[in-house]
Amino acid sequence: MKTVIAVILIVVGLACVAGGVIYFTQPAHSLPSFFPSHTSLRAAGANIKHTKKGLVAVVIGAVVLLAGLVVAAVARRPAAS
């Protein structure tokens, strides 16, 4: 069961890091439609990037990824007798 939780945490962490990278590299009007605030500045014609949202996504992704790696390490440890 711990292995399943570790895999889920690792996948979610990687997805958050990837989302953060997309926030850093794409202007606001080019974000995918499922990203929050993808249309907030489209009408204004602004060509800015969401740096804060990207940073938060990368930090959360790193924390979740680290938690997944810790759970995976605990799952691999032999049971104490």
Image (cartoon, rainbow, N blue to C red):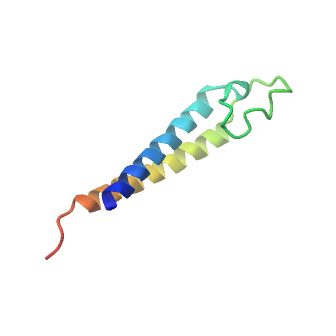
63 or 76: nearer the viewer? 76
Q: Residue at x 48, y 47 (%)?
A: 12
Q: From the viewer's perspective, is 18 left or right of 77?
A: right
In the rendered image, the vertical position of residue 74 relative to residue 63, given as above or below: below
Q: From the viewer's perspective, is 47 left or right of 6?
A: right
Q: Residue at x 17, y 73 (%)?
A: 80
- Can you tell which quarter of the image residue 34 is in? top right
Q: From the viewer's perspective, is 12 left or right of 73?
A: right
Q: Residue at x 80, y 25 (%)?
A: 46
Q: Residue at x 46, y 47 (%)?
A: 13
Q: From the viewer's perspective, is 14 left or right of 80?
A: right
- Can you tell which quarter of the image residue 73 is in? bottom left
**Residue at the farthest bottom position:** 81
Picture coordinates of residue 53 (x, y %)? 65, 42
- Can you tell which quarter of the image residue 3 is in? bottom left
Picture coordinates of residue 9 (x, y %)? 43, 52
